[in-house]
Amino acid sequence: MRQKLVRIIGGVALAALVAGGAAACAKDEGGSAACDLKFGFFGALSGDNAGLVVPMKNGSALAVDQYNATNPKCKVSIVEFDSQGSPDKAGGLATSAVGDAKIVAMIGPAFSGESEVANPIFEQAGLPAITPSATRPSLSTKGYKIFHRGVGNDFAQGPAAARYIKTVLGATKVFVVDDQSAYGAGLADEVKKGLGALVVGTDKVSDKQTEFSAVVTAVNTSGAGALFYGGYTAEASLFLKQLRAAGWHGTFVGGDGINDANMLSVTGTADVEGTTATCPCAPPTAAKGTFQADYKAKFGASPQVYSDVAYDIANVLLDGVKADKTTRADLLAFLGTYSKAGAASGVTYKWDATTGELDPSQVVVWAFEAKAGAWVPKVEIPKS
């Protein structure tokens, strides 16, 4: 019902906003780019899954702060849209974003479910968006001109996770669980395809679920030595704790949705030890240039997963501003011709004109392992 209302708003009320957004700013008399432009950042900045998203916001903020330090008379700012990772909140936030004519681009949304709701609204308003982390493949199949993905999708991550489970772990019996989200269910389906007959059981959990005894019993009964979980930290951490309490000693593997500090702290060092999280990204601790030192100096912590990607994405948009691309339409056209390596990740950001997907040659998938309370890069998973 709520999504239907969003579509109605998008078809009527937003029409008046598109013209304003298209002319978000103008040249001053001297011909220089208009000032006081804004980028949006859209994602779970609070709530159970904020541990995955806040580092991305920090990476974006670092890039903008560095730009502003050298352009003090013509600054860019970031407007935060805290979705708490909920698709139910995404429609209202997206409508608010496109209504601010000074917002000329969006970094995000961070999650796939909220992207499914927000992207149609951004498309109608012509607001270019680059997600640093939403990996559901179908996001790029809608024909949206505004959509760009800064990492690989789950057609890369899912098969890679399956190869890791088969070849690195050597598992012969695997149980697969997902949280029924747009992201979790889609990723789990790709993993199941890759594992084939090794899958000895499947099950589902729900958003906000805290008691998992039925699923835990099914896993123990199956004899599985490995489990793949498609979903986010909020449920995965409690599920893993209950699996360990019930005596399951197998290897817990998840996608990038659990690759955050909260998965480590909430689960606890003993129970999370040896857990694997895959990610269609390289380790941020291997980032190039001064990114690592700059991030730590500003935020007092080492960069975490996707923070380097978000930093690079913000710099892509800032490159557009430097080139006097100061309207939504101009920035969108600018992204269509962009091809440059990111200063932090080293990835060449170049997008398919039809899908908005990253050039496949730039996609990598890594496995990270929980060791002594930290996510440690383990191996880049081969593409085949």
Image (cartoon, rainbow, N blue to C red):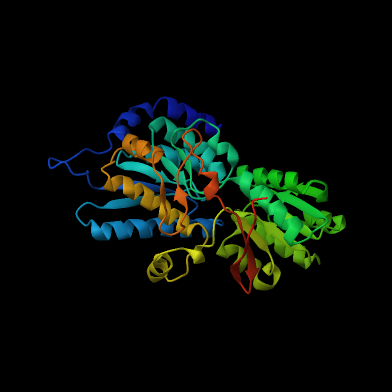
**Residue 338: percent from left, percent from top:** 39, 43
Give the left or right position of residue 118, taking residue 335 as reference: right
Give the left or right position of residue 248, taking residue 104 as reference: right
Residue 111 visible to the viewer: no
Give the left or right position of residue 248, taking residue 11 as reference: right
Give the left or right position of residue 54, taking residue 321 as reference: right
Q: Residue furthest bottom?
A: 372
**Residue 148: percent from left, percent from top:** 47, 41
Q: Residue furthest top?
A: 12
Residue under the point 73% across and 57% down: 165
Residue under the point 36% across and 36% down: 333
Which is more toward the observer, 208 or 150? 150
Q: Quadrant of residue 58?
A: bottom left
**Residue 275: percent from left, percent from top:** 68, 64
Residue under the point 56% across and 31% down: 1
**Residue 178: percent from left, percent from top:** 70, 48
Determine whether 11 is above or below 37 in the image.
above
Which is more toward the observer, 381 or 26? 381
Count the marks.
0
Determine whether 267 is above or below 352 in the image.
below
Which is more toward the observer, 195 or 59? 195
Residue 136 visible to the viewer: yes
